[in-house]
Image (cartoon, rainbow, N blue to C red):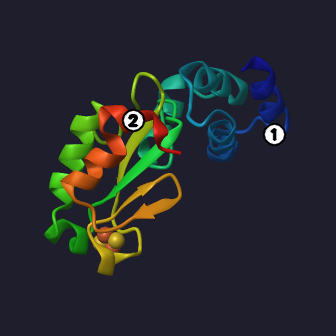
Amino acid sequence: MEEQLNAILSSYEKRRDNLIPILQQVQEEFGYLPEDAMLKVARAIGMPESRVYAVATFYTMFRFTPMGKNRITICRGTACHVRGATRILEEVEQKLGIKEGETSEDLEYTLETAACIGCCALAPCIMINDDVQAKLTPKKVEEFFGKEKKHEVQ
Ligand code: FES
């Protein structure tokens, strides 16, 4: 991590107004903002670590835990909501053993929600990585995330 971080920091002037682009690049490199990296960024630009953390947590684009291998996005938009998105979310949470915003311990899955994933007519929808899965039912959730299929999602 040290080497990548040094490369990122060396590509920016060590100024406080570069904090956001530096953090964005750190996240691009590691998939999230590791605590050690934020500390190092803080020292490099001469800003208290608490301030760096406060800025980073203000923006929803920053993550503080690693992403799972598979990113599951449950749509919570109106069309999906009225067609059972809440139940779908609960089912997926139960199958994966994680809550919205969390990553499984084995780093297989990260579970997120979205305001709309753009296929309202096929609600309720979820995305598994880049693939939209439409007209979700608890049975389909079982097919995707049931124990025996758990590691076949690609
Ligand atoms: S509301 Fe779910 S896809 Fe638009």
Residue sitting at x 23%, y 75%: 79
Residue type for callout 1: Glu
Q: Nearer the viewer, residue 7 or 111?
A: 111
Please say if 115 is above or below 72: below
Residue 137 x, y percent position in the rendering:
22, 59
Residue type for callout 2: Lys
Beta carbon at label 2 within 8 Å of ligand 1: no
Q: Nearer the viewer, residue 70 or 61?
A: 70
| Observer able to see residue 44 | yes
Horizontal relation, residue 152 to residue 12: left or right: left
Residue sitting at x 77%, y 35%: 14
Q: Which residue position holds label 2?
A: 150
Horizontal relation, residue 78 to residue 31: left or right: left
Residue sitting at x 41%, y 48%: 72
Quarter of the rendering containing residue 86: bottom left
Tag on residue 13?
1
Residue 154 x, y percent position in the rendering:
53, 45
Total number of numbered labels? 2
Ligand 1 shows up in the quarter that is: bottom left
Please say if 69 is above or below 42: below
Residue 127 x, y percent position in the rendering:
42, 58
| Observer able to see residue 55 | no
Q: Nearer the viewer, residue 64 or 119?
A: 119
Question: Distance from label 2 to label 1 (Cα)?
Answer: 45 Å
Please say if 39 is above or below 26: above
The tag earlier along the polypeptide, 2 or 1, is: 1
**Disc 2 secondary structure class:** helix
